Amino acid sequence: LLLANMGFQADSRGMADDQQARIAAYNFFNRDQMAADQVLQMWNRQDREPLYPLELAMLAEAYAEKGDSRALSLTKQLNKFHPVTAKAVLARYYLRSGDPSRALEALKTALTDFRIYPWVQLKVLYRSFDLGLELVNALPDRAMELFELFSEPFCVRIHEYTRTIK
């Protein structure tokens, strides 16, 4: 679980089927591109509820990508551990469910807070860069607001390279 949270691919050989399914879901979650269908498919091969913040983030973001309202309750739980990550997930959910203005507000909160709060799920925040680009297309009249969100470095310069090239 720790390695999966750090972005490493985990090896599940020799584990029980439910453990293999969770490891496969973690591995899909840790890709740079959203793999919501695969995450949910692997997670649903086992029968327990999410227990850890990583699992909450993984499932909340996957459901958010699908515009599925199950993301909302998972995000509420995630907010107790990683409020910045929870806001980024909400931004994805709002955009996918057809509310780009609300998505922009959630993303603005997430990225503003990310400047002072480094405890985030890094893959979720990484994927928020692309979400910002999608919002530019959805709300072209607010593109300058989005540009300003990415104009300042984040806490401890996390994702600095990505921030400056996207």
Image (cartoon, rainbow, N blue to C red):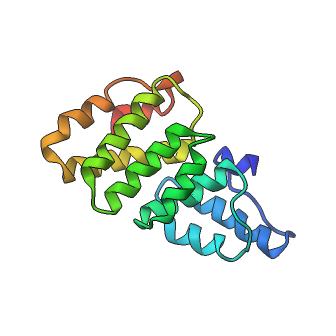
The residue at 35%/31% (across/down) is 164
The residue at 27%/56% (across/down) is 99
Q: In which image quadrant can residue 48 be found?
A: bottom right
136 with respect to 42 (left or right): left
Q: Is residue 113 visible?
A: yes
Q: Give percent across and percent down for residue 65.
A: 43, 62
Above or below — where is 116 with respect to 133? above
102 with respect to 66 (left or right): left
State the residue lying farthest toward the left.
141
Above or below — where is 163 with respect to 95? above
105 with respect to 121 (left or right): left
Q: Out of 36 and 47, give the one closest to the viewer.
A: 47
The residue at 31%/31% (across/down) is 149
Q: Give percent across and percent down for residue 143.
A: 19, 39
Which of the image's four quarters has the C terminus? top left
The residue at 75%/52% (across/down) is 1
Q: Give percent across and percent down for residue 33.
A: 46, 57
Q: Out of 31 and 80, give the one closest to the viewer.
A: 80
Q: In which image quadrant can residue 79 be found?
A: top right
Numbered circles on residues, count: 0
3 with respect to 16 (left or right): left
Q: Is residue 35 visible?
A: no
